[in-house]
Amino acid sequence: MSSDEASSPLNPDGKNRFYSDALLTKGKSRGRSLTNCSKLLIACILLLLLLLLVIVLVAVFVVVLHKVVAEEVAEPWKSKRLPSSAKPETYDITLNVDLDTLTVTGEESINVKVVENTQWILLQYSESMNITSVDVLDSGKSQEGVSNELHPDNEYVAISKEGDFNKNKVYTVVVKFSYYLYSGGLSGFYNSTYNEDGEAVVLATTQFEPIYARKAFPCFDEPAMKANFTITIVHPNTTIALSNMPILAMHNDEDGVITTHFAPSVPMSTYLVAFIVCEFKFTTSLTNASVNVSVYARPSLVNDTKYSLDIAVQVLEYYEQFFGINYPLIKMDLVAIPDFNAGAMENWGLVTYRETALLVTENVSSSADKQWVTEVVAHELAHQWFGNLVTMAWWQDLWLNEGFATYISYLGTNICHPEWNYLDFFIIGDLHVALEADGFNETHPIIQSAETLSEINGFMGMEEFRLGLNHYLNKHKYGNAKSADLWSALQGVVENVPYNITAVMDTWTIQGGYPILTVTLTDGCAKLKVTQERFVIVPTDPKDFAKSEFNYIWKVPINFITDSNPDPSETFWLNKKEDEFTRTSLSKDCKWLKANFGELGFYRVNYEDAQWTALTDLLNTDHTQLQTADRANLLDDAVSLSIAGFITPMQALDLVSYLKQETDYIALRVGLLSLSQIHTKVILSKVEGSFTDYVLCLLETEIEEAVGTFPNATTGHLENLKRSLILKYALLYGNTTFAGLALDEFESFMAGTKEPVPDLKDVILTAGIREGGQAEWEFLWNKYVESDNPTEQSAILSALSYTKEPWLIQLYLDRSLTEVRSQDGLTVLRRLASNSYAWPYLWNFFKENYDELFNRYGSSLSFGRAITAATGHFTTQNQLDELEMFFSNRDAGSGIVALKSGIEQIKSNINWLDKNLDNIDNWLHEFLLANCNKM
């Protein structure tokens, strides 16, 4: 399942996902090759897999899944888990869907095998469902003495009969039910609407992960309860019906409906079942293995499906080759849904997407839009193997789905567009986001007794790794697996290695957070002392950490490069708090040493002051001596360590200042996003003006080049991304020359005389709103209302958030609840959080409308981001006190982790500003005077 779209304050095209980098760096600098460090690379890559995903998803799964009780009890409906005494084998489900009344009537027959004698068979259902009858058949005969009780608190239908249900017998449970197609929450079987030729059109679609299949039909709604599903949909004859499997038969009824029968499914979990009733059109193609691939969209957008169709075919063919296992079904449908809460959902054979994650419109979609579609398609199709073919036994092992789907999706995207150098995007797309998110004391360990998520590591060459995955998938296909099953498969293909995968992985999965390594040179670069401790963004007494059986010591693989040894050293392992290492491959004499080559390890590195100075001098003298990943690593580590108090902000700013010479998109973006962390703290302080001048000074050359091609189209994906990034910073940090040029382009667009090129449209629209007033804002809002293109609407929603006018900010907030699609309501809040002019209004709006926001989004993946949007700018004790008071008697829903981390962040902001503001003010004054012709 792909996360919903996210953006940083100055990163409008940033759609953060999670990934592991098997091929992160390609050895571009000084001819280095990853073959020189493949053992280290694979030892580290998968440590990076799940940490962002954990922060984004753990809150939701903790909220909706609760703590579990495994054993059957006398009153099993009081347990949060289904009893193990009965398991489904097959479902035969018929749903009659009426789109006029938005009602569904259904009947199902579930063949249930009793594993041990039991008085009860439990199904899970939703309180919003009306159960009209329940019957139990034995060999086709209705059983006497059958009764059922509804337990809505834990969502159970408890079925009992006189005497026990007998071990090893298969009973048929027949249930009749009805419910409304309710769009609130965009989960279960719900309705979505769109306009076509001026008419409102209704469709019905599904979203079942993690526990929403029960809202569509009573079921055994746990991932290990796999079964075969035979689906029949009765629907209006103006519509089509889709489901996981191909259509087996269709017939027209006399009362204006069609009955569509689908082929029986392969064994699968309930959360992967899907069905849709709609009036969509499609494009279609075949893979070289004759899999029928189709992309569906509303009729007016069907031409926008061609790009994703081509990507889907390429990716499916590549995955079959990579996994060594054919795609298990004969068709693959990808469907663009107008109202969809997440980015996408990997339902087997019927993948559903938010429209902006699947559709590419010629002359509208930007380079970033096209990249996002490629990423998400590749991610969801990877799930057809990781998650669908082999499914985690319980949600604690969700990484078996999400981690590998994300990892594999980077490989799939790279196959489709090798010119993007896409494997490098791991750094900005996931790694640094994960390091930031997991740097709070409140972060969860990956595996918990409360049943959440997990993480993986591997210790082998790439081909061995691929072979291990093949063994794992073949052994557990159509079934379920746990972490131990993967460790076993990977360990089984590794020969003559001194480490045990499980032993290493336990240190990374059973305790929260990650380490910071401090490297000290004791005999030049030949002898090193390395210590480790847990990294947290707010200085915290270790006694306040959650208890860890490993005492926050990790098994960490490390290597180094130096000026005299530019190829990475052999790998050594830090297995305790502190160790010394004599490295015969490293020269004693060196000017600088850089640890964590290629940023392959999931940890931060601190150096002695002399080494920080040497690395800063290196970057300012010849930054190309380090490859992009290492430059990005130093930028992110330096700023993060300065925020956490390990080094001073002035040391970090000294290092970041080399960006005056940087030309690489990845490194520039990392540097600018790192600086945004500081900027957010100092906005409204005495140093804000100097800080924005400092950033503009660093970008002076890049801004000049970007403005030189404005407003014309350019070629090259990376160049387009870089120009968009630079111009957005130029605009938002106050470059008046560019602001004027961009506003002129907006006025031409407003007059209807010129359409911006797609890769510049975002910054031009933003300029029109930021530099304009009511007329410009109302013009663009009307464009949003009139547009039927979701990509264009998304760009407009972002641009509208940058107004400086208080009343327009408040109007936009109000309309987010009334005139913006429910799926985009929180997007408005997050975008407004990028505009400091909106900060005074966000928190008040959040407080005043909390109940409605909670009812809409409280269990969604996005609610934590809503809390962050409303409070992420807090820097005072009064603001912290108000936040804690507000939530002292309120449920934070799926945002509980974001709330706790946000409180830590505010404490960090208060402490950091108190200690550093005056020193930063002096440093900026001196830097600007010496380097930027500024007083």
Image (cartoon, rainbow, N blue to C red):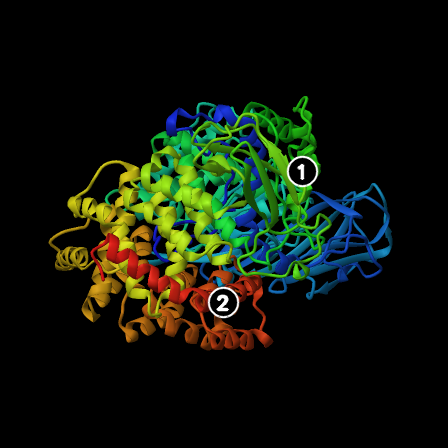
Residue 821 visible in rendering: no
**Residue for point 29% across, 74% down:** 806
Vertical placement of residue 874 versus 704, above or below:
below
Q: CA distance from mark 1 to mark 2?
A: 36 Å
**Residue for point 42% across, 31% down:** 563
Instruction: Name the front one of labels 1 and 2.
Output: 2
SS label for mark 2: helix
Q: Position of residue 669 (x, y in %)?
A: 35, 47
Local crowd size for mark 2, using a 10 Å CA cut-off: few (<14), some (14–19), many (≥20): some
Residue 911's disc is: 2
Residue 664's disc is: none
SS label for mark 1: helix
Amino acid under disc 2: Asn
Q: Position of residue 359 (x, y in %)?
A: 35, 44
Q: How many marks?
A: 2
Compare residues 665 and 542 and report the one nearer the observer.
542
Q: Position of residue 720 (x, y in %)?
A: 27, 42
Compare residues 256 and 389 and report the one nearer the observer.
389
Q: Horizontal placement of 890 versus 80: left or right?
A: left
Compare residues 126 and 10 and report the one nearer the observer.
10
The residue that label 1 is drawn on is 504
Residue 783, by quadrant, is bottom left
Local crowd size for mark 1, using a 10 Å CA cut-off: few (<14), some (14–19), many (≥20): many
Q: Horizontal placement of 340 versus 122: left or right?
A: left
Residue 562 visible in rendering: yes
